Each structure stands twice: as structure tokens, then as C-alpha cells.
Image (cartoon, rainbow, N blue to C red):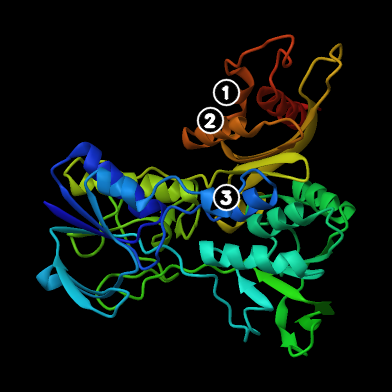
Amino acid sequence: MKVVIIGASHGGLQAALTLKRLAPKTEVFLIEKRNEISFVSSGLILKMNEMVDELNQVRYLTAEDLEKKGIHILLETTVKKIVPERKTIIFEDKNGQSGESTYDKLILATGSNQFSTNLTLPSKDKVTAFKSYPSSVEVLEKLENAQSISIIGGGYIGVELCDALKGQGKEIHLIESADALLFRYLGTEISVLIEQKIKDSGVNVHLNESVLGFSDTDEERFVTQTTNKEIRNDYVIIAVNARPDTELVKEFLDINANGTIRVDDQMQTSEPDIFAVGDVISYPVRNSYRKSFIPLVNNVVRSATVAAMNVLGHKINYNMTQRTTATKIFGCYVATTGLTEMEANFEGIESESNFVTLPCQLPYLELQEDVHIKLVIEKSSHKLIGAQLMSEKDITQSINTLSLAIDKGTTLEELLTMDFYFNPAINQPMGFISQAAYEFLIKKYSV
């Protein structure tokens, strides 16, 4: 069997590797329009935080590695057309030479395109839309001399960039059109704590402000015009609005209203021999009535694994996603899973929440660390539907426990009585997850 995969980012690579591990005799062809593979987009943050020496190190595979595994890869090759009735793709290499290839199965891993915006942008010397390796190189070069920088987008990338830039004596502006940072993942309580830490570091935070455009662009310090202010800056980073790249297939595959390719639970599209994975599809969200566009690498890798197994005839369905995330910013670990209260209301779920700050250790220990934890439950059943954590202690693995709890429909009462370990040198007899459930129930049942 011959499998062609379009796109050699995380999804395409995972699908190719899985196919070869399960069925080594399968012919696997990867086609990638760029000249490099496996770059992790947050590599920019790793380099800025001096966690790696070179930006180009933030990779986990090379084209040579793939060839050794029997995976054929064409770099700097653009697929121009797919002809599903003939199971054929037409491509063009970097020299403009055209070619054709047939396939038995096709996997679309075209991902999300560069961040898009309706704004008319000044030259690349002044504004960079950040995501890929080339744009990361560009950002590093421009930040070297920039003194007044605006970052558009208060999601993970924008906040992590602020963290990496703190303490460098630069004037930083973080612009977010919503009324809170990381609003897709956090409720008010933890978002406010993060906002205050960012402000304390010297960053100017602009909430409820949309960027309308740029002016005076021929001057060294040009203007970023928001709905409320004119900000003078010499460099702008755009970190918003990644969109699924479906240009190749929008004429013959079923497309969702949000622009993603419609797939079933086995990643199969409306064409039975074509599968789609990664940022080009939408995902079923636990406790949601709809699928959502969620460009997270953990979803990409899972969907690619499912697609590869189903291409080979192993029936496996994609499970729900809780949109589980974690990061470290401004000296704190932040982790989230499931729905926020706002999302629960949007889904028509009557919810309740409780936010508490709890000590991780017993009081006799010299080291004392707190964890901020918020639980969101379905009011009628007490089932956990969302959770958010923040602490100077690395509590990120606990979010996986809470994600599993949401997936299995675990109630507050079950969280309270669940079997978690205790060690008097590490934690409390009632761990902070159970303690958070305990405090929630005390609040609910107190007369």
C-alpha cells in the first residue's frame, strides 16, 4: 500500500512514523512545501529563555532520520492539486518542475497557515506574524535592536513572549481584544493573578483593545492604532488568528462552518481514502455539543496516530479532548483543562465553581508553596467539567489527573475520596485536588 502525506509538521511526521512502525512494508511519502521539518513553534521562547543554544536545535527529527526509517520525503515541494477520482496528486518542486504521484490512501496534514489578519501590515522590518521557523528567526533578529515592542494577542504565545522579554529594559505593550488574558483557558481569578504579575514586570497591558491599523510607518517609531490608544513602537509581533489551511481540498471535501475539514471519529473525510489530521480539523470537546478548532500539538499527535492506525485497518476512534494545556510564566506554572464557566454557560450547562488557595506542604516544613486551584462542576450532577491551576511549585502533572477525571465523569465526592498518595516531606494527607473538592463541598453544604 502507498500512503502519501501532505505536510511534514507534527501531524504528518507522527502519521508517517506510526505507519512505518505498524507496517514496515507500507510505502510512505511525505511532501512538505518548506525546506525544514519538526520545528517546535515555541522554540522561540526556549531560545529567548536560554534553554537551548540555537533556535535550529528545537527539532526532534531530520529528513535524513526519516529516510533511514524508509520514509520518502520531498522538501520544498508544493502540492498544486489533488484529483481524488484518480487518486492522484500533482506537485511542483523548488525548481518549478511538475510531477505526479498516485496514492492508495492520502493523509492531509496541512495544518494551520501563518497567523492571518485583516490588517494592512507594514514591511517585515516592522511587523512579524509569528509561528514558523523563518518567522522565529526574524523575531529574534528584530528584537535585538527593538526598544519599543507591541505584542498583539494575549494568548499563550503573547504572554510567554512577555515573560521572555521581561527585565531587558525594553518597553513592552501586550494588546488583547478580550477583557482578560488567556481567556480561552482561564476564569477571572487566575487570569487576574497573571495580569498583575505581567504588570509588575513592567509590561503595559492593554485589554479590551483591538488593533485597527498602523500609521507613520515610514518613521522609525511608527504608530500601532488600537480602539483606545496610539502606541509608538519600532516593532510589532502578531500572535493571533491561526487558521486551518484547506485551500487544496475545499472544492471537493466537506468543510465545517469554521473552515476545518469535516472528519469522522477515525479521521476519515467525505472521501473514504482521504484522512485529515492536526490543525486542519476540528475536535470533539468533552461536555460540548460541537467540535472546535483547537490548534494544540497534543491534539495534532493524537489525531495523526488515530488516522495512521485506521489507514491500516485498525479500528480506533479519537477520544474527546479536554483542551489540556500547561506553561511556565513569570515564575509560576499554569495549567488548565476542560470548560471555563463562561464556556459552560455557552454550552447550556448550569455550572458552579469554587476558587481556593491551598498550601501544598504541612506547616512544619521550611519550604511552603501554595497552589491556586479552580474547579468547575455541572451543578446537577457534581461532575467535574473544568479545572485551572497556578503555583510556583510544578503542579503541571496534576492537570492530567484532572483531565482524566473530566473524561471519566468524576464527581466532587469522588475527587474528595479518591486514593492519592501522602508523604509528610512532600505534601498534605489530603492532596490539593481532594482538598479543593473538600472546600467546594464544605461551601455547598454549610448551613
Of badges 3 and 1, the one in the foreground is 1
SS of the residue under disc 3: loop
According to the picture, the residue beneath numbered tag 3 turns out to be 349
| Observer able to see residue 289 | yes
The quadrant where residue 380 appears: top right
Q: Which mark is residue 40?
A: none
According to the picture, the residue beneath numbered tag 1 turns out to be 414
Q: Residues within 10 Å of mark 3 (few under 14, many from 20)?
A: some
Which label's residue is closer to the chain start, 3 or 2? Answer: 3
Residue 205 left/right relative to 311 = right
Q: Quadrant of the C terminus?
A: top right
SS of the residue under disc 2: loop
Residue 28 rendering spot, x and y as whole percentages: 20, 52
Q: Which mark is residue 410?
A: 2
Residue 331 rendering spot, x and y as whole percentages: 77, 40
The quadrant where residue 206 appears: bottom right
| Observer able to see residue 229 | no
Q: How many angstroms separate mark 3 from mark 1 (CA)?
A: 20 Å
Of badges 3 and 2, the one in the foreground is 2
Residue 49 left/right relative to 90 = right
Residue 137 rendering spot, x and y as whole percentages: 59, 63
Three-letter residue code for mark 1: Glu
